[in-house]
């Protein structure tokens, strides 16, 4: 009996079992009130408040499991989705795990643009994306030379130093590992981040998938916004509401002092400092900012 047969009453949700995406995924699920307890020795965890089973898999395998309908939902890097070539629904960018799949060449070498690597040897664990990238470059030239693309599963950054390759294609987040290996980025193949993906042929009810998607959307929205309140004399509102129009409209409440009102709105987190400065300049008082843990808009 396979996993699907034993968990027919649950939505199967594939999560990276370790690595740079794991902790962020766990935090996202908990903030979305998808509660579970995972044993260190098990790669399956049953949710305690929803009919969901979390399946912890290598990030590179998740697109295949979701694409073949073995799992209904999954979280993995868009780089893994594109590399696998499987047909899945990409539901949303989760906006964490951001990095770039880049062409990297020796910093002290002569390669400064990817076209110079046509006909050379390039290694990567993303062999399909790398082959596609250089195939497109080859199509822009009149030469019939083909680039040799070799697969290396780990320690890709060491390939040039060991004489295995002229350049590598690898994920770059901070760039420290690349610089330590004496490499520099000369082109970006693909910017990537974690995405929520879904099977085109899910085994679970679409309403449960919509519930999960809605909860995750709520968490992501809450991370983008903060809740702002302030008090002001009513005659100052026209100028103040140009600064804080709100997503739909502000909430305005009368205070016991007849000429004063309280204003409540959601504002973009990234604009908080600027908005508070402008509110103060336009005579708002008692300006306060509150965190939003979750919301639906």
Image (cartoon, rainbow, N blue to C red):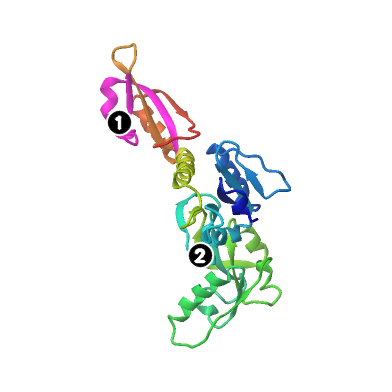
Query: Vertically, is 149 above or below 269?
Result: below
- Residue in front for this viewpoint, 296 or 260: 296
Q: How many marks?
A: 2
Residue bearing the label numbered 2: 86
Q: Which residue sits at x=69%, y=69%?
A: 158
Disc 2 and disc 1: Cα gap in Å? 48 Å
Quarter containing the N terminus: bottom right
- Residue 240 on the magenta segment: yes
Find the magenta span and give its range. Answer: 225-253
Q: Residue at x 58, y 60 (%)?
A: 172
Query: Image height check: is 166 above or below 53?
Result: below
Tell me if 244 is positioned left or right of 52 in this view: left
Counting from the top left corner in percent of width and height, residue 195 is at 50, 53
Quarter of the figure that contains the C terminus: top left
Marking on residue 176:
none
Select label 2 or label 1 by which is in front: 2
Q: What kind of element bears circle 1?
A: helix
The image position of residue 45, as x and y in percent, is: 64, 45
Residue 20 at least partly seen: no
For marks 2 and 1, the one nearer the N-term is 2
**Residue at 67%, 43% in the rendered image:** 38
| Residue 5 counted in the magenta span | no
Location of mark 1 (residue): 241
Q: Where's residue 47, x and y in %?
A: 60, 40
Percent x, y of residue 263 = 35, 24
Quarter of the figure with residue 50: top right
Residue closer to the observer: 73 or 217: 73
């Amino acid at each position: 009996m396979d996993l699907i047969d034993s968990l027919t009453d649950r939505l199967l949700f594939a999560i990276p079992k370790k690595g740079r995406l794991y902790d962020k995924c766990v935090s996202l699920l908990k903030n979305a009130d998808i509660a579970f307890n995972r044993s260190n020795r098990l790669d399956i965890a049953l949710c305690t408040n929803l009919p969901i089973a979390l399946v912890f898999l290598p990030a590179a395998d998740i697109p295949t499991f979701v694409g073949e309908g073995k799992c209904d939902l999954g979280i993995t890097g868009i780089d893994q989705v594109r590399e696998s070539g499987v047909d899945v629904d990409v539901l949303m960018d989760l906006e964490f795990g951001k990095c770039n799949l880049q062409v990297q060449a020796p910093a002290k070498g002569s390669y400064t643009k990817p076209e110079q690597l046509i006909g050379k040897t390039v290694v990567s664990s993303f062999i399909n994306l790398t082959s596609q990238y250089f195939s497109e470059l080859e199509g822009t030239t009149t030469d019939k030379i083909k680039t040799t693309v070799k697969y290396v599963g780990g320690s890709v950054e060491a390939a040039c130093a060991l004489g295995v390759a002229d350049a590598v294609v690898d994920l770059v987040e901070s760039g420290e590992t690349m610089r330590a290996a004496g490499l520099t980025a000369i082109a970006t193949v693909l910017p990537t981040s974690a995405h929520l993906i879904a099977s085109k042929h899910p085994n679970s009810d679409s309403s449960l998938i919509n519930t999960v998607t809605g909860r995750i959307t709520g968490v992501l929205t809450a991370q983008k916004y903060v809740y702002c309140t302030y008090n002001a004399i009513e005659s100052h509102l026209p100028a103040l509401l140009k600064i804080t129009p709100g997503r739909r409209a502000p909430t305005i409440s009368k205070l016991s002092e007849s000429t004063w009102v309280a204003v409540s709105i959601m504002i973009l987190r990234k604009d908080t400092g600027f908005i508070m400065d402008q509110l103060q300049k336009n005579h708002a008082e008692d300006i306060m900012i509150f965190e939003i843990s979750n919301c639906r808009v």
